[in-house]
Image (cartoon, grey):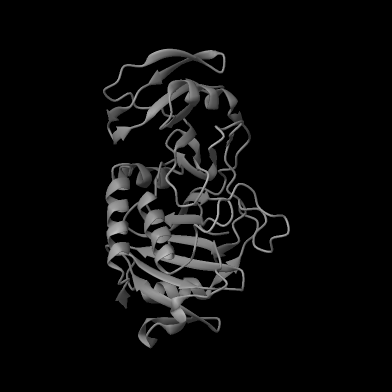
Amino acid sequence: MTRLSDEHTEDLIRESLEHLATRAPDGAEVRDALTQRPRSRPRMALALVAAAVAIIALGIPLGLRAYTTVTPASPRNADWAVLPYKPGWLPDGLKELTRRAKPYPGPQTRTWGNGEAEQVQLTTTPLDVRGGPWTIAPAPNQIIVHGRVGMVSELYGDATMLTWTPDDTYLLSLTLYGIKDPRGVGQRIADEMVRDDRARVSGELRFGGLPADLELSGVYTYLTLGGGATELEATRIGPPTAAAVVTATLRAERPDSGDAAPVPLKIRGADGFYLPERTGRLGHEDATVAVQVEGGRWLTVSGKRDQATLLDIANGVQLIPGDYSWFGKPPE
């Protein structure tokens, strides 16, 4: 196998991983959740960033245009919340932990893990019509999946990625972490990949309104020890790789106040509070408004905007039914 050779790409991967590592959860929480069939908060940010950056390095132009809605006539996954592929086989003990999707043409990601070091992530991206570099990769680095040429590469750390096209619509990237014989195991997973088109990223939040320069850029669903959690992201209108400017979250845990004192604030007609930028247990935290909603969970809106803007977004957020029945299960 060969490493992705672009020096800038390696630096970008490293910087992204180091930045997001500050937000990673305690592994014991994930392990406990899987053992008890409860709820864990696996924020698989490291896996997502590594795969997404690698896709960019492989030449997939995720940032060609802004995406607010999907063109109905598009033959490529008209509903970006539907996950088109799933593994037909995974090593024993791996259970689904997270689902994440971005509007077309952004990636869709599913993660399976065992609460320890072993983890498998599947990222699906609309296929670039130009094809990919795997067709000219050295023979030792090529793989064949149902007659189609793909490529295997080492990523930062102990990660191994297999990339191939199962059809003329999608690019699949399978990233394996902490797996023994990752090329062999990855090849079997790729060989047994099947169409899904039923699984969805179905969270419990919708933005009711956003500032004119922002748009929905992703939905992320996972479970915590206290129950299901949903995160919505909004970025500035532009490339889909842009960092989130505002994040809305619904989860059981009260937001961390860190070194800031909560300022009482009426939100959605109830008693909530405002937190300025602060240092918390996970490092730097953006300004946040938070309120406890029906059922006892916390709705928070945070980001790089002033208090009035965050409050306006929080007041407009819609709470809807979500689906977490997939959590902690192998592919069905």
Q: Nearer the viewer, residue 61 or 220?
A: 61
- Residue 319 lies in quadrant: top right
Look at the image and tell me whether residue 79 can be seen. yes
Looking at the image, which residue sits at the far bottom? 139
Q: Considering only vertical position in the picture, is 112 above or below 130?
A: above
Q: Is residue 254 among the parts visible in the rendering?
A: no
- 31, 284: nearer the viewer: 284
Q: How many numbered circles does the render carry?
A: 0
Q: Quadrant of the C terminus?
A: bottom right
Residue 125: image location, x then y, percent: 53, 62
Residue at 42% across, 71% down: 162
Q: Is residue 293 above or below residue 62?
A: above
Image coords of residue 212 (percent x, y): 57, 34
Q: Nearer the viewer, residue 54 or 130?
A: 130
Measured as percent of width and height from the top left, residue 249 is found at 48, 33
Question: Residue at horizontal 35%, vertical 23%?
Answer: 276
Position of residue 324 measured from the top left corner of the image (x, y, whole percent): 55, 43
Residue in the image at 32% along x and 46% along y:
20
Extreme residue toward the right, this view: 73
Q: Quadrant of the N terminus?
A: bottom left
Q: Tell me the residue at 29%/25% (across/down).
A: 258
